[in-house]
Amino acid sequence: MNKVNNIESLLSEVSIKNNIEIVDVQYIKENGDWVLQIFIDKDSGVTMSDCEKFSYIFNEILDKSNILQDSYILEVSSPGLNRVLKQEKSFKRFIGSKVRIQTHISINNQKKFLGPLLSFNNGILTINDVTNGVVNINFSDIKKANLETEI
């Protein structure tokens, strides 16, 4: 298990108790500093107050755990308009929304898809792709997926 997965596992209990979804975790090096980015969401939307509260809570848990040996900067924020979709429940939540998906394998000679998410059943999502029309994609074949917001 890598650091990101360990962090998600460590923080999952407190996030579930507080009805907060950890949408994504990234541990990256920026300008010579390690940055731990945790993107959170909840049904009513995330406020600045939520980000502050969970920054404090997550920081305490992480410091006690010693998962991260390097010094790091913790950033807790909302996933934003083009949020990452990683979990099955996220795909189900955003049925009807426009999504951008990249797959590990080619489907109809294509690895990048864009269009409304029509359904998600039994590990298979159906998208109405702008290039190929209706396409079925196995959840396990997804490399990356995001909501696609039109402004």
Image: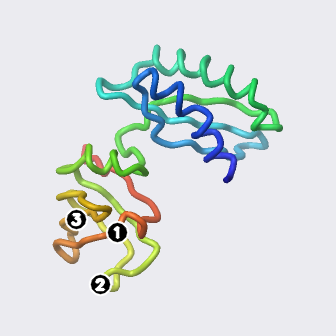
Q: Residue at x 50, y 21 (%)?
A: 51
Cβ atoms under marks 2 and 1 closer than 8 Å = no
Amino acid type at mark 3? Thr
Dot 2 or dot 1: first in sequence order is 2
User: Residue tagged by mark 3?
Assistant: 126
Q: Which mark is residue 138?
A: 1
Helix, strand or loop for disc 3: strand
Amino acid type at mark 1? Asn
Dot 2 or dot 3: first in sequence order is 2
Q: Which mark is residue 7?
A: none
Q: Picture quarter containing residue 135? A: bottom left
Dot 3 or dot 1: first in sequence order is 3
Q: Position of residue 106 (x, y in %)?
A: 39, 81
Residue 67 is left or right of residue 105, and the answer is: right
Q: Which mark is residue 108?
A: 2
Q: Position of residue 38 (x, y in %)?
A: 55, 35
Q: Picture quarter containing residue 20? A: top left
How would you rate the neighbour count of disc 2 (Cα within 10 Å): few for under 14, some for 14-19, many for 20 or more? Answer: few
Marks 2 and 3 sit apart, C-alpha to C-alpha, by: 14 Å
Amino acid type at mark 2? Asn
How would you rate the neighbour count of disc 1 (Cα within 10 Å): few for under 14, some for 14-19, many for 20 or more? Answer: some
Marks 3 and 1 sit apart, C-alpha to C-alpha, by: 9 Å
Name the residue furthest bottom: 109
Q: Residue at x 49, y 35 (%)?
A: 39
Q: Residue at x 34, y 85 (%)?
A: 109
Which quadrant of the rendered structure holds the C terminus?
Answer: top left
Helix, strand or loop for disc 2: loop
Q: In the image, is residue 29 above or below residue 132?
A: above
Helix, strand or loop for disc 1: strand
